[in-house]
Amino acid sequence: MKTILLATDVKFWSARRGSASRIACTGRYLREHGFNVPVFFAGRLEAGDVTLLSQRYADLEIVAAQTAQDPGDSPPPGPGKDAREAASEAGRSGPARARGRRARWTARLKRVSTRSADNAGAAPVPPPPTLASFRSAAYKASFDRLCAAIRPDSIMVEYVRLAYLIEGLHAVLPALPLTVIDTMDVMHARCREFRAFGHPHWVDITEETERQTLARFDTVVAIQEHEAAVFRRMLPGKRVVTVGHATDVTHHEWRVRSPVTLTYIGSNSLANTDAVTFFLESVWDDLRAPFGAGLRLRLVGDVCDALPASARREQVTMLGTVDDLASVYADTDIVVNPVRFGGGLKIKNVEALCHGKPLLTTSAGAQGLEQGAGSAFLVGDTAESQRAALAALITAPARRRELGDRALSFAREAFAPARVYGELCELLSRENACSSV
């Protein structure tokens, strides 16, 4: 049995973000298809995490760089460093500091979104960290110790901020494993899009920095074909594979009911808070006027925590985080995702299609799903086009049912697990252990 060491700082066991769901589904598929997949978690496991892991992943081998029993909040000291030196290093440029900056940006976005005169003198958003800000000598040392202990056949790193973990592995392993970087996004392009819409990105990264970082790996994983093409252009000759997202396809009982329920599901990311704010201010008020009590909107996920008080409107319910998304979809007539920027693959759109729900999204939301645009789901980039598309669906139950049926058909083909993960499994099954580390 081949061992694939999965390295991540995402708490995938919570499954409350699209990125977490994708990591969980990928790991599950690999385990179900004969791979041993231990996990290195670059972060701190709290008591609640341990409880969730025991409930949902009782058989999973997971090693954390920190646990709730570790003293302090800084990474554990690595070889040749005492605790004070390691803590000082983490305080200057460690992952905790980078995450703190990201939290401040979210708070800043809440204040900006209120658009009140009180914000005239608000402090500017702090500059984003660079990729180097996420380095931790302590996490690296912990990762090296784990590699030396289990000698993996392959290492799969989740996202570019942890790319540093594969550096210098020749010093701890007799034979270098196959190294794979799962990108999730073309980060320099995502960074550029955020800035174009006036929002900071969680990391300041250029195309050249991203290119140099990805070049250290044997294989680059793209989340959709358009981004795979970008990586092939950036890295001529590099092996690039595409791994999207696969989840269960669920058929819900068809019902015609009142009020017609629109649902948005999302985390408290900047792209999501921007999408909801835009929809409420530019689409919702005019859309609901002719329908009165016959229309409602539900906002689901911790995006609700990031929205300003002005987001509260008539016939809008903020459910917050829920554990049973299947019941949310069952009580949904139309899913909306008016995201305006960001790359990758919108997992919330994949899940809506897999639940057979009529979906309205944007060109940004349709990235990686273009073959279904206009048939399996609808696309509208302006407030006017979104209002028109939604009004047509609201007044035509038969059209909603037809679109939902097309969504299911599309999902069964596009998100079939063998199709999504087949190329990755074939790669990881090979005996080729050649590495470019």
Image: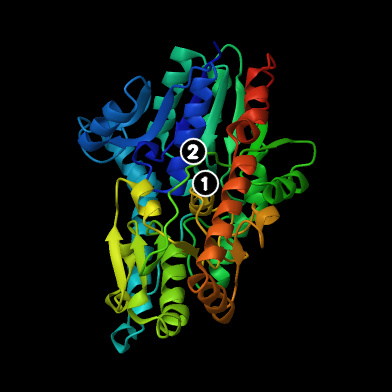
* SS at mark 2 in the image: loop
x, y (%) of residue 408? 57, 48
Residue farthest along the right direction in this orientation: 237
| Residue at image mark 2 | 248
Q: Nearer the viewer, residue 250 or 33?
A: 250
Image position of 208 with respect to 108: above or below: above
Rendered view: 225 above or below 383: above
Type of amino acid under label 1: Cys
List the residue tagged with mark 1.
Answer: 354
Q: Residue at the spot x=46%, y=57% of the render?
A: 202
Q: Amino acid at mark 2?
A: Asp
User: What label does residue 382 carry, if any?
Assistant: none
Q: Earlier in the sequence, mark 1 or mark 2?
A: 2
x%, y% of residue 249? Answer: 51, 41
In the picture, the quarter occupied by the N terminus is top right
Q: How far apart are the two marked residues, 1 and 2, measured between alpha carbons? A: 7 Å
Is residue 361 toward the left or the right of residue 72 in the image? right
Q: Residues within 10 Å of mark 1 (few under 14, many from 20)?
A: many
Under circle 1, the secondary element is helix
Residue 157 visible in this rendered orientation of the protein: yes
**In the image, is 164 to the left or to the right of 297?**
right
Question: Which of the 4 image quarters holds residue 274?
Answer: bottom left
Q: Are marks 1 and 2 in contact (CB under 8 Å)?
A: yes
Residue at image location 21% in from the left, 38% down from the top: 72
Measuring 53% from the left and 34% from the top, which residue is drawn there? Answer: 157
Provide residue 320's location: percent of width, then percent of height: 29, 58
